Image: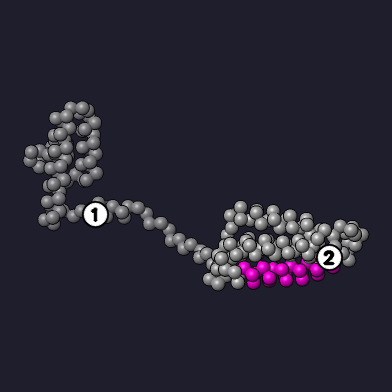
Amino acid sequence: MSDKSSYERLGLSEDASFDEIQEAKSRLIEEVGSDRKQVEAIEAAYDAILMDRLRLRQEGKIKVPERIRFPERLVEPPPEYTPTPVKQAPDWLQRFIDTPSGKDIMLPAALFGAASLLSLGAPSLALALGVGFSFYFLNRKERKFGRAFLLTLVGLVLGILLGIQLGGLLSGLFAAQLNGVFSVESFAAIVTFVILWLISSFLR
């Protein structure tokens, strides 16, 4: 099949665009339906035209449109987007911060809650248990005995000092309401448990 007859077979002129060639091929194949011989003849004409265009391009006789040579250029470039950089904590702080699971938060919370109830009757025993809980949960994360001991000690001292101060203030303000319910020691123990829970859950 000559090139001229290929163009004629598709009903095209020799200066037809690439889109026109493709449309003619698709339209004619739809028209002939399931006639295998005619479909093959249309596809052969289409292939012959493409080969002819390729030869002419290689010889420099035709210029290929930019959109065919570089189809990716059809896609509009996305607008300039510069994501806001996420402010990260310093490395030394990230080494101390933990992101616990729900179970790792709830189990210590339950144990420290039980120790808080115990502190209403026996603050010293409750504090001893709370210190043990805190040390256990911190040490099991990375098996660093020294760090677990130091963080527990800091939490204990901070909790007692803060608890005594707040307990003394509250007992002065609400002496009648708290009489016989909370002692300053019990309140200090509860504050200490909250701090130890925060440390053992969210630090490592």
Whether residue 171 sits left or right of residue 36 in the image: it is right
Image coordinates for residue 39, horizontal then vertical, percent: 17, 32
Image coordinates for residue 176, horizontal then vertical, percent: 92, 59
Q: Nearer the viewer, residue 87 or 39?
A: 87
Image coordinates for residue 151, horizontal then vertical, percent: 65, 69
**Amino acid of disc 2:** Val
Whether residue 89 is visible here, answered yes or no, is no
Whether residue 147 sits left or right of residue 80 in the image: it is right
- The circle on residue 36 is none
Whether residue 52 sits left or right of residue 162 in the image: it is left
* Magenta span dominant secondary structure: helix
Mark 1 sits on what residue?
69
Looking at the rendered structure, the secondary structure element under dot 1 is: helix
Mark 2 sits on what residue?
184
Q: Is residue 61 magenta?
A: no
Where are the magenta residues, as a range?
148-168
Q: Is residue 20 above or below residue 77?
A: above
Mark 2 to mark 1: distance in Å? 82 Å
Q: Quadrant of the C terminus?
A: bottom right
Q: Is residue 150 magenta?
A: yes
**Amino acid of disc 1:** Arg
Image coordinates for residue 88, horizontal then vertical, percent: 54, 67
Q: Quadrant of the N terminus?
A: top left
Residue at the left extreme of this rendering: 2
Residue that appears at 71% across and 58% down: 112
Disc 1 residue crowd, few under 14, some 14–19, many 20+, Cα 10 Å: few
Residue that appears at 62% across and 68% down: 148
